[in-house]
């Protein structure tokens, strides 16, 4: 069995769902995955870590630094990479500035797997360059539509096609708010309900004002067209008064991104409910393709992260 050492950065909903999956499926396809460090805002624990024990400690004590079996290190993200030197760095944190940690890892030949959107949306070119320099892989399936494999489609399966356009519902929280409004709720009440159910980002304006959808659209643009979108227009859902059949739609075409609420026709594949996300991809050879699936939730997102870890493990340079 090839032993692959994994560092997990961030241990919230997705990180803990990932721990559970790794406990269950840590040996797969001739690879043995070992967790060598886990980081939350309280610090980094470093050693041979049992995923289920770590999950329990975090859930009962609230912070990893309370676990007295491990020494706790106060590494900066870059120091974490330099000191622990895992084979794969997995970012399941909400740290917007994790970009330089990825760059450090990739340049050192360490594979990076992430579900964290801003570093990929804002630094794709630099990160791809660092990945090339280090001969390491950068994987980010779960950043868009969580575990529903839209990135894999664009990055692997449709490589021979030219993408013409993508239209997508990429943010389930706004779908929730809009469907509540369709049922007669006011915008404010619908936001309150979304907050109560814990489905809004820590900063709700990221969902409501379209920032989260914009990050995802930027990632889709990079993957579909290999370049940055020059024109980006974003309008959230605050001004929607009549929410009938309205969804927050991201439109992506070469050089251009537009995120805005749109009224859809009856029967549109984008008229999703609940946590479902959907994308209509148009290409020159294949024509129109629809991909639809869950766009959030711990296990759903960890599904994409875990598959990426396996991909990164098979991509790795031979072990030392
Ligand atoms: N949940 C979903 O459905 C979903 C879907 C797709 C993508 N994502 C993305 O996946 C990531 C994780 O999501 P989540 O739902 O698991 O978030 P979460 O529950 O809020 O957990 C975030 C984790 O990141 C840690 N963290 C944040 N900033 C940090 C820093 N500077 N240094 C070290 N640790 C830091 C937090 O530490 P503490 O525990 O100490 O606070 C926490 O453990 C986010 O980027 C999110 O946007 C989530």
Image (tube, rainbow, N blue to C red):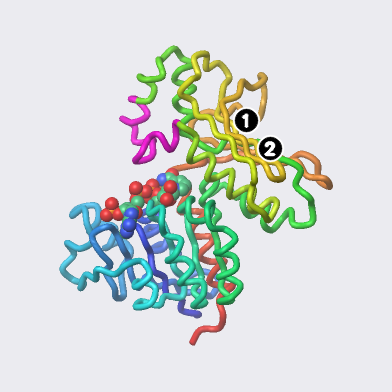
Q: Is residue 161 above or below residue 214?
A: below
What is the number of the mark on residue 270?
1
Circle 1 Cα neighbour tier, 10 Å, few/some/many (<14 / 14–19 / ≥20): many
Total numbered labels placed on residues in the image: 2
Determine if the magenta segment contains residue 75.
Answer: no
What is the number of the mark on residue 241?
none
Q: Is residue 203 above or below residue 25?
A: above
Viewer-side residue, 10 vs 313: 10
Q: Position of residue 75 (x, y in %)?
A: 29, 69
User: Which residue corresponds to the image point at 58% horizontal and 50% vertical from the top-left?
Assistant: 219
User: Which residue corresponds to the image point at 29% horizontal and 73% vertical from the top-left?
Assistant: 46
Viewer-side residue, 258 vs 242: 258
Residue contact between numbered discs 1 and 2, judged by CB atoms under 8 Å: yes
User: Which residue corresponds to the image point at 48% horizontal and 58% vertical from the top-left?
Assistant: 114
Circle 2 Cα neighbour tier, 10 Å, few/some/many (<14 / 14–19 / ≥20): some
Q: Write the start and end of the magenta stretch as one range.
A: 192-208
Whether residue 266 is visible to the viewer of this picture, yes or no, is yes
Residue that lies at the very extreme toward the right in this rendered image = 285
* Secondary structure found at label 2: strand
Q: Taking 153 as reference, is 26 left or right?
A: left
Determine if the magenta segment contains residue 193.
Answer: yes
**First reached walking from the N terminus: tag 1 or tag 2:** 1
Which quadrant would residue 293 be assigned to in this image?
Answer: top right
Q: Taking 190 as reference, is 308 left or right?
A: right
Q: Taking 306 as reference, is 169 left or right?
A: right
Q: Position of residue 254 (x, y in %)?
A: 72, 45
- Mark 1 sits near ligand 1, with its Cβ under 8 Å away: no
User: Which residue corresponds to the image point at 55% horizontal and 70% vertical from the top-left?
Assistant: 130
Residue that lies at the very extreme toward the front in this rendered image = 230
Whether residue 11 is visible to the viewer of this picture, yes or no, is no
Q: Position of residue 231 (x, y in %)?
A: 64, 41
Q: Which residue is mark 2?
A: 280
């Amino acid at each position: 069995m090839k032993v692959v050492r994994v560092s997990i950065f961030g241990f919230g909903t997705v990180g803990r769902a990932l721990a559970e999956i790794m406990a269950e499926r840590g040996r797969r396809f001739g690879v043995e995955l070992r967790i060598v460090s886990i980081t939350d805002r309280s610090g980094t624990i470093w050693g041979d870590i049992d995923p289920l024990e770590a999950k329990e400690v975090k859930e009962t004590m609230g912070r990893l630094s309370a676990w007295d079996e491990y020494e706790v290190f106060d590494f900066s993200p870059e120091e974490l990479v330099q000191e622990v030197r895992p084979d794969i760095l997995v970012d399941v944190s909400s740290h917007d500035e994790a970009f330089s940690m990825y760059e450090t890892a990739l340049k050192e030949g360490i594979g990076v797997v992430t579900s964290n959107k801003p570093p990929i949306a804002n630094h794709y070119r630099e990160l791809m360059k660092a990945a090339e320099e280090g001969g390491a892989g950068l994987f980010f399936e779960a950043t868009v539509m969580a575990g529903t494999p839209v990135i894999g489609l664009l990055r692997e399966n449709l490589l021979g096609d030219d993408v013409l356009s993508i239209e997508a519902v990429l943010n389930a929280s706004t779908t929730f708010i809009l469907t509540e409004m369709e049922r007669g709720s006011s915008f404010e009440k619908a936001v309150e309900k979304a907050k109560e159910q814990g489905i809004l980002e820590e900063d709700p304006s990221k969902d409501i004002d379209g920032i989260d959808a914009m990050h995802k659209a930027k990632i889709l643009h990079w993957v579909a067209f290999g370049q940055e979108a020059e024109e980006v227009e974003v309008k959230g859902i605050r001004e929607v008064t009549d929410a009938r059949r309205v969804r927050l739609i991201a439109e992506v075409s070469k050089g251009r991104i537009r995120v805005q609420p749109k009224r859809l026709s009856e029967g549109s594949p984008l008229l999703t409910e609940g946590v479902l996300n959907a994308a209509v991809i148009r290409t020159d050879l294949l024509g129109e393709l629809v991909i639809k699936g869950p766009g959030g939730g711990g296990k759903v997102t960890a599904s994409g992260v875990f598959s990426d870890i396996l991909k990164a493990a098979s991509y790795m340079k031979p072990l030392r």
